[in-house]
Image (cartoon, rainbow, N blue to C red):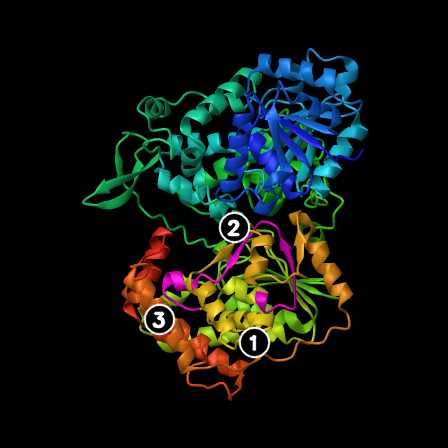
């Protein structure tokens, strides 16, 4: 069936999020609530939301609004009606009665509930109505979270369920995974269990919350918040309600029950208003002392707060085997948590789903795990796992595996989708090359480079991988959340702290050479960004020949925030793009002034639609809704450009000193208005010098290499500056900019 019109009933956080995402997919949607003013306010929140729920804000009027009394007739025209009202079964039943009286024949009706089973939701429906009723559990925020659980039971018309799945995948860009009607469905059942295991084991082993979060974080392949940080983010009181629901719904012998029990410290935190980030604090709190903000952590034994302690496990990347092999409390904790997660997840096969790989994908898409429980088992190795595991009687999956000892049990990833994804294609690579910062997957006709550092920050190893991979057509993309947050500033500052500025210069020059090699390679280079594509990450992208961009990108040149200027060709390429405009042909200062404004303010875009007017992306760059489709789109670009020839070199004619003076006047105005301070003037002046061409005149031509030299010299003068160093160190320590 074709879904051309959608009605959403309930304009709260989830209803609004679903409406916005349908709008992103150009699907007409009507948002209904008790009163039209409520749905109008919801539409206004969608428009103003940060981070933005809309890819293109100009399309906001495509979301129609109304109320369930006066405007319910719109249901008659809808192909899909989504209920997203409060989690009260009486209210939902009343809504369903009204929907099924008014819907057109065959229209799909679904609930966005996160916990109430279909059998309860549908108990008052006829058998015919039950065929068209399911749960569509979107994860919040809808635009940014890849997972959509479509929950079915024995009453459903499977053809219709599959049709809905295909629509959500192809049009909405979701990883739509079908699962059975069980408590907590798929993602939350395992995700919440994992959190509870990580928490209870920390209490049991007397780890500090910083220690637990250091282990149950990047080294394990889960978000850096860790378990206690995630508790604070979600809300400690909300988590308590979620656990009550699981305790009520699950049988008494379910392994979830013991880890869901009340913890006195948590009760105390809730009672005193320490409910997490939305309250006075939680397991962590920000305390003000002498006008300074100090992050504090609670002691799990005493309940007292003290300044947080940094825990360095000396593991920079996700490394399960390294982690569980440690002969210390961290290794013991990691093994205890990981083994229990694997045991629990495997016990749910085939109850939740008979495709165990779908559980992995649910954890990747819904909880941002680097690998799911079964991938963890694969990474550990079957023999190693069973050599260490304790009793698993009654777990059919593990019982069968313990007999077969099949190290290749996993099979294919991402069975839920027909799309040829990066995850699917990687195992078929002819050769795999790894270094500390990147992985190169070599195929017969092309290469793929993935970055593997924290936030995919770039260093020598990243660049070595890129350079070595240009011997064939190249795709640069990652399965992780980010494309690249830029050049590794920690790496750079290590040289600075040793007063080794020559090594800094050498490093930046090597980055320039790498970007130049990408741009002028005899084979086409495609960048396929998603998530953060900032600074040096953008410079890699902008000097690739083709781009296939996910719609959820954050893209831009942000170097001025840390007291630097782009030095990997970012200034050069942006100037070149703006110099190709009609306005630039009439005014030689137009392009430099435009780029001065964009880079000076460190402007970013949060979608390809926002990126195009800034010229961060070109109109011909591909825009992809489904992140899974980035590989196939990139491969198509390579296939379409087999007769590729590298671009001609950029050459510039710039006004030099008079142009720089114009830019400095802009800076002086900002300085007088206290928009920028002393060091802002210094950084802005260096940027002005680069974009004006330095010591040049309009009758001279500046080559690409000469422009690279301008960027490098400005970068070096700034990195030597103590105030730039202060900015960088402050940002690395706090994640926030320093204005000085």
Neighbourhood count class around disc 2 (C-alpha, 10 Å): few under 14, some 14–19, many 20 upward: some
Q: Which residue is mark 3?
A: 665
Residue 367 in the image: state x and y as whole percent: 55, 39
Under circle 3, the secondary element is: helix
Which label sits on residue 586?
1
Q: Nearer the viewer, mark 3 or mark 1?
A: 1
Under circle 2, the secondary element is: loop
Decide whether residue 553 is among the magenta residues.
yes
**Start and end of the magenta stretch?**
542-565
Residue 359 in the image: state x and y as whole percent: 64, 36
Q: Classify residue 33 by image quadrant.
A: top right
Distance of label 1 from label 2 (alpha carbons): 56 Å
Of residues 462 and 301, which is closer to you in this image?
Answer: 462
Under circle 1, the secondary element is: helix
Residue drawn where x is 47% and y is 58% of the image:
603
Of residues 721 and 351, which is closer to you in this image?
Answer: 721
Q: Is residue 161 above or below residue 545?
A: above
Residue drawn where x is 51% and y is 88% of the image:
700
Q: Which residue is mark 2?
A: 319
Residue 171 seen anywhere in this rendered image of the structure: yes
The reply, left or right, for residue 229 in relation to residue 358 is left
Neighbourhood count class around disc 1 (C-alpha, 10 Å): few under 14, some 14–19, many 20 upward: few
């Amino acid at each position: 069936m074709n879904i051309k019109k959608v009605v959403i009933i309930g304009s709260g956080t989830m209803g609004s999020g679903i409406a916005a995402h349908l709008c992103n997919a150009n699907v007409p949607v009507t948002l209904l609530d008790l009163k039209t003013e409520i749905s109008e306010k919801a539409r206004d929140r969608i428009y103003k939301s940060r981070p933005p729920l809309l890819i293109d804000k100009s399309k906001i009027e495509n979301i129609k609004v109304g109320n369930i009394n006066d405007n319910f007739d719109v249901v008659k025209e809808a192909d899909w009606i989504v209920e997203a009202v409060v989690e009260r079964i009486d209210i939902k039943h009343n809504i369903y009665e009204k929907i099924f009286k008014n819907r057109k024949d065959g229209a799909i009706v679904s609930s966005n509930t996160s916990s109430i089973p279909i059998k309860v939701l549908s108990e008052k429906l006829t058998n015919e109505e039950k065929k068209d009723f399911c749960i569509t559990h979107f994860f919040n925020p809808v635009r940014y979270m890849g997972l959509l659980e479509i929950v079915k039971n024995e009453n459903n018309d499977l053809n219709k369920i599959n049709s809905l799945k295909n629509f959500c995948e192809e049009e909405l860009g979701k990883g739509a995974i079908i699962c059975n009607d069980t408590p907590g469905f798929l993602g939350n059942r395992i995700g919440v269990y994992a959190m509870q295991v990580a928490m209870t084991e920390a209490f049991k082993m007397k780890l500090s919350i910083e220690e637990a979060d250091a282990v149950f974080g990047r080294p394990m392949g889960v978000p850096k918040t860790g378990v206690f940080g995630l508790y604070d983010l979600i809300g400690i009181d909300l988590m308590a309600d979620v656990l009550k629901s699981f305790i009520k719904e699950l049988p008494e012998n379910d392994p979830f029950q013991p880890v869901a029990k009340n913890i006195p410290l948590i009760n105390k935190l809730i009672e005193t208003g320490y409910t997490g980030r939305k309250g006075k604090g939680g397991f962590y709190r920000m305390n003000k002392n002498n006008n300074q903000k100090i992050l504090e952590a609670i002691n799990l034994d005493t309940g007292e707060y003290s300044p947080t302690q940094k825990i360095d496990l000396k593991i920079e990347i996700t490394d399960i085997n390294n982690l569980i092999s440690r002969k210390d409390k961290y290794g013991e904790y990691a093994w205890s948590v990981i083994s229990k997660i694997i045991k629990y997840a495997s016990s749910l096969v085939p109850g939740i789903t008979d495709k165990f790989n779908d559980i992995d994908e649910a954890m990747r898409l819904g909880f941002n795990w680097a690998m799911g429980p079964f991938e963890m088992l694969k990474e550990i190795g079957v023999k190693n796992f069973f050599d260490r595991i304790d009793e698993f009687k009654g777990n059919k999956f593990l019982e069968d595996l313990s007999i077969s000892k099949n190290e290749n049990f996993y099979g294919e990833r991402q069975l839920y989708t027909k799309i040829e994804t990066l995850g699917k294609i990687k195992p078929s690579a002819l050769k795999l090359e790894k270094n500390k910062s990147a992985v190169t997957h070599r195929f017969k006709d092309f290469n793929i480079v993935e970055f593997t550092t924290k936030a995919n920050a770039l260093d020598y190893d990243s660049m070595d991988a890129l350079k070595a991979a240009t011997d064939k057509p190249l795709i640069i993309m990652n399965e992780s959340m980010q494309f690249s947050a830029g050049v590794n500033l920690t790496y750079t500052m290590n040289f600075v702290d040793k007063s080794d500025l020559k090594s800094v210069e050498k490093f930046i020059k090597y980055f320039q050479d790498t970007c130049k090699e990408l741009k002028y390679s005899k084979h086409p280079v495609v960048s396929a960004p998603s998530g953060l594509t900032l600074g040096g990450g953008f410079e890699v992208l902008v000097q690739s020949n083709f781009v296939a961009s996910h719609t959820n990108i954050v893209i831009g040149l942000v170097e001025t925030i840390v007291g630097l200027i782009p030095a990997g060709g970012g200034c050069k390429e942006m100037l070149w793009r703006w110099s190709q405009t009609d306005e630039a042909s009439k005014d030689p200062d137009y392009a430099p002034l435009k780029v001065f404004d964009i880079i000076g303010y460190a402007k970013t875009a949060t979608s390809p639609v926002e990126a195009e007017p800034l010229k961060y992306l070109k109109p011909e760059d591909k825009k992809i809704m489904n992140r899974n489709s980035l590989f196939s789109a990139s491969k198509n670009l390579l296939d379409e450009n087999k007769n590729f020839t590298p671009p001609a070199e950029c050459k510039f004619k710039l006004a030099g000193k008079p142009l720089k003076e114009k830019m400095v006047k802009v800076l002086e105005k900002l300085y007088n208005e206290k928009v920028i301070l002393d060091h802002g003037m210094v950084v802005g002046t260096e940027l002005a010098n680069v974009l004006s061409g330095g010591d040049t005149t309009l009758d001279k031509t500046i080559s690409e290499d000469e422009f690279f030299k301008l960027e490098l010299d400005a970068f070096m003068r700034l990195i030597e500056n103590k105030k730039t160093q202060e900015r960088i160190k402050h940002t690395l320590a706090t994640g926030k900019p320093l204005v000085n």
